[in-house]
Image (cartoon, rainbow, N blue to C red):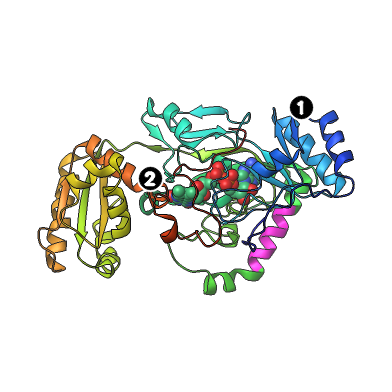
Amino acid sequence: MNAPQAPVRPLRGTRRAGDAAFAARLRREVDGEVLFDAASRGRYSTDASIYQIEPIGVVVPRSEEAARTALAVAAEAGVPILPRGAGTSQCGQTVGEALVIDNAKHLHALLELDVDAGTAVVQPGLVLDRLNAELRRHRLWYPVDVSTSAQATLGGMAGNNSCGSRSIAYGNMVHNVLAIDAVTTGGERWRFGPIPQTLDARAGPPGYIELLGRLRALYEREKDEIAARFPKVLRRVAGYNLDHLGPPHANAAHLLVGSEGTLAYFERLHLRLSTIPAQRVLGVAHFPRFYGAMDSAQHIVKLGPSAVELVDRTMIELARANAAFRGTVDAFIKGEPDAILLVEFSGDDRAEQTAKLRQLGELMGELGLPGSVVEVTDSRQQKAIWEVRKAGLNIMMSMKASRCPSSRIVPCRSSTLPSTPSG
Ligand SMILES: Cc1cc2nc3c(=O)[nH]c(=O)nc-3n(C[C@H](O)[C@H](O)[C@H](O)COP(=O)(O)OP(=O)(O)OC[C@H]3O[C@@H](n4cnc5c(N)ncnc54)[C@H](O)[C@@H]3O)c2cc1C
């Protein structure tokens, strides 16, 4: 499932010829829940987007083997499959007329952790916050800190090539996935990873080596076009990562990252972890005009921040109107700016970080906005401010229906994030 489609109302009760036999076979062969009833298909017909399409059915596998069996049965029946994590995608990635494979309920183990090497192997349904809770005691974290970290799964994050507020320092998923053990619809189960110089038997089984050869030939054929046309921006998450098939990355797993479930099913993800920085400081830079905030970012990034995130006036006003966030907003946002930038510096040296914060103040002065930075050095206060930023969509959803961006399509939902139906 790739490009957004026109919003479609779920067709309740619609059945395809052969679905009953397909469901019966899945029930016989798959160790897991097999859900083909109207209520379940209705629940899985949405994600965090405006799109609604009823799936053919849903499998909630209890084991990796069960997921593989479901894939094999679907492939034999000619039914497309649609892997699903938390379903927090905003462009309809997890809705479609397919067999949904829901990983969130059972396939969420942290399988391996190598603290010295800073690597981990996880199942696709593991939620980011849970992984980071495990890693914290080792002073490690997985740094692709999406706003939906309490729901988003590592499989879904890889599927979307997600990026977090600190991507300026750590990159997106494609920069933090080392390898993926994936299953194709042909039933092959391969470890997609670095593409070696020499494609001999050490590179993997014959079918995988053949695939690597084809990927390498594809890259060689298209590399000039890729160099000429792929946008050179930090957060490029659209399309297949063909540029990562060649140097300096040359990694077949990176082609799967961002493929939105269209190329293979991810069974295990091999992740690169990062050390939690000992020190973090935050500057809340105030701008009287939205344009000024956008325009200043190019200068601010030269100071080497670990995050630069925008919060506009609409969100500030809505957060002020919300009792849960009012205290934080009033404490750190002065007056009525059109926008603020949250600028974070992090590292191991406190003096270095506070010096950067001072430089931010000086820079804002040079940009014509002296005294416009509120310095936040207390870690709890920083956390509270990031929570407001993270709660962005929920805060937006508290808009009155007539002003809600999605009100012309569906009624505004309640102010809670969607979650995986089985989760
Ligand atoms: C309020 C809000 C804030 C958000 N903030 C951010 C943000 O800060 N940064 C960001 O990048 N995104 C953000 N998103 C989008 C979304 O939350 C992220 O992309 C998230 O990482 C998706 O995780 P998920 O588990 O919900 O994936 P899902 O939505 O379940 O799936 C995502 C894609 O991955 C595929 N997939 C899932 N599992 C597998 C598997 N095992 N094998 C193969 N493919 C698989 C799915 O088919 C789908 O195409 C936000 C969304 C909302 C609603």
Q: In the image, what residue occupies the spot 53% across and 52% down?
A: 161
Is residue 68 inside the magenta stretch? Answer: no
Is residue 214 inside the magenta stretch? Answer: yes
The image quadrant where one finds the C terminus is: top right
Drawn side of residue 187 relative to residue 379, left or right? right
Give the percent coordinates (x, y) of residue 205.
75, 42
Q: In the image, what residue occupies the spot 50% across and 59% down?
A: 406
Q: Is residue 331 visible?
A: yes
338 lies above or below 308: below
Give the percent coordinates (x, y) of residue 395.
37, 48
The answer to which of 127 and 322 lies nearer the viewer is: 322
Q: Nearer the viewer, mark 2 or mark 1?
A: 2
Q: Which structural element holds mark 1?
A: loop
Q: What residue range appears in magenta?
A: 211-220
Dot 2 corresponds to which residue? Answer: 391
Q: In the image, what residue occupies the spot 51% across and 57% down?
A: 248
Dot 1 corresponds to which residue? Answer: 31
- Which mark is first along the chain, 1 or 2? 1
Does the Cβ of the disc 1 residue fall within 8 Å of ligand 1?
no
The answer to which of 195 and 113 lies nearer the viewer is: 113
